[in-house]
Image (tube, rainbow, N blue to C red):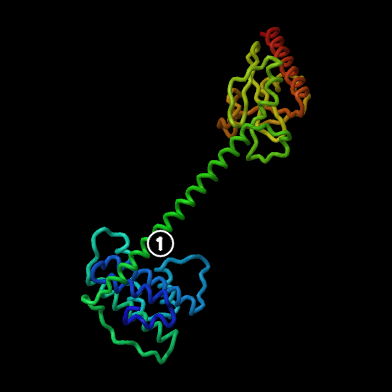
Amino acid sequence: MKSSIFNFLGEFSSTLEELALRIEALLWEQPQAAMTQARLFGETLVSMIFEQENMSEVYPLKQVEKINRLFKNDVIHDEIYKKLEYIRKNGNIASHQVTEIDQEVAKQAHRALFELSVWYAEVYVSYTFTAPTYQLPSRNNQDHNNLKQWMDDYIKQTQQRLAEIEGQLEQLKQEKQQHSVVKEKKGSKVPKDLNSVRSTERSVPLERFQSSFEKINFKMRNLTKKAAEFEHEEYKEFVYLLDRATPTVAIHPSLVEQTKMLVEVPNKQVKSTALRRFPKKEEEGKFKSNFGYTYTFQTKSELEVLLVRVVDAIKSRSIYIGENG
C-alpha cells in the first residue's frame, strides 16, 4: 500500500483510508475529482460520529443538517464545524460545476481532512494517539498506478450501476405493461355481482342492461364514467343508467313530480353533473348540480317493468297536458 499520512485511518476505518488515498492520487492532476471524493469522506466521517454518539435519525438527514445537529449538541466545536462545512460546500461545488475547481481549494481540503481525521482518532479511538506530521503528497511521487487502479475500479462500478439501472428500468416496464393489461381486462369485464365490487372499480353496467333499454325503445345517446344516457325514440324523454353498487336508473324530476305512477315506487333524489339533460337544483339562490330521482332494480325484468312505467308516466303526462293545454 502507498505510504501516506492517512495510513493511520486503516486502524479503524478502511473506507476512510481508501477515500483519503484516492484524494491524494487525484489531488494534483484532477483537483475537482479529488473534491468529490473529499465530500464522500466528510459524509462518511459524520456518519461515524453519529454512530459513536448514538444519535439516531428519525428520518434521513442531509449532510448540512447532520453537521448542524452535531454542533448544536456540543459534539463538535467551532473549528471542526468550519472544516466539515468547508468540505461539504466545496465538495458540492465540485460535483455540480463544469469548470475545474481551483487547485488551492483542493489543497486546503486535504489539510482539513487530515485535521478532522486526527481529531476523530484522538476523541473516539485513543486519547494517546500521536498524529503524524502533516504534509502534502509529493507531486513528483504521484502513484499513477494507484490512480489508474482507482479509475478502473470507478469505471467498473459505474458500469455495474448502469447495468443495475437498466435492469430496474426493464422490470418497471414489464410491471407497467402487466398493470396495463390487467387494467384493460378489468375495464372490459362486466362484474357478476356489483355489490362485491369496490366503488373505485365500478363502471356503468351497460353490457348487462342495454338490451332491456332498447327493448322498451330507449336508445343510448351518451356514455360517461358516471352514467349512460338513454332517450326514448318516440317521446324524446331521457333516463340515465348510473354507476352504482346497486343497478340504478335516474328519472327526470318533473316526470316523477307530475305523475302518481312513479311517486308510488320507492325513489331517492340525487344530484350529479352526469344528469346533463335534467334541470339544475336551486340552493341558496344558486343553481347547483343537475338532479333527478333514482330507482333501483336487480334484474333485467325489473328494469323493463320500471321502464314501461316510465313510458306510461310520459303518456299520462302528455294526455294531461293535452287536455289542459
Q: Where 229 sits versus 19, above or below?
A: above
**Residue at 61% across / 34% down in the picture?**
187
Q: Where 324 sits versus 50, above or below?
A: above
Q: Amino acid at mark 1?
A: Gln
Q: Position of residue 243 (x, y in %)?
A: 65, 32
- Dividing the image into 4 quarters, which one contains the C terminus? top right
Left or right, residue 256 beside residue 275: right
Q: Position of residue 200 (x, y in %)?
A: 63, 40
Left or right, residue 130 beside residue 248: left
Question: What secondary structure is marked by label 1?
Answer: helix
Q: Furthest-left residue in view?
A: 140
Quick one: label 1, few (<14), some, or many (20+) residues within 10 Å? Answer: few
Left or right, residue 22 beside residue 183: left
Q: Quadrant of residue 63?
A: bottom left
Left or right, residue 117 beside residue 279: left
**Residue at 67% across / 26% down in the picture?**
207
**Residue at 68% across / 14% down in the picture?**
217
Q: Quadrant of residue 146?
A: bottom left
Q: Quadrant of residue 234?
A: top right
Depth check: 37 or 47 in front?
37
Residue where numbered disc 1 is placed: 157
Q: Where 191 sits versus 49, above or below?
A: above
Q: Position of residue 83 (x, y in %)?
A: 33, 76
Depth check: 92 or 244 in front?
92
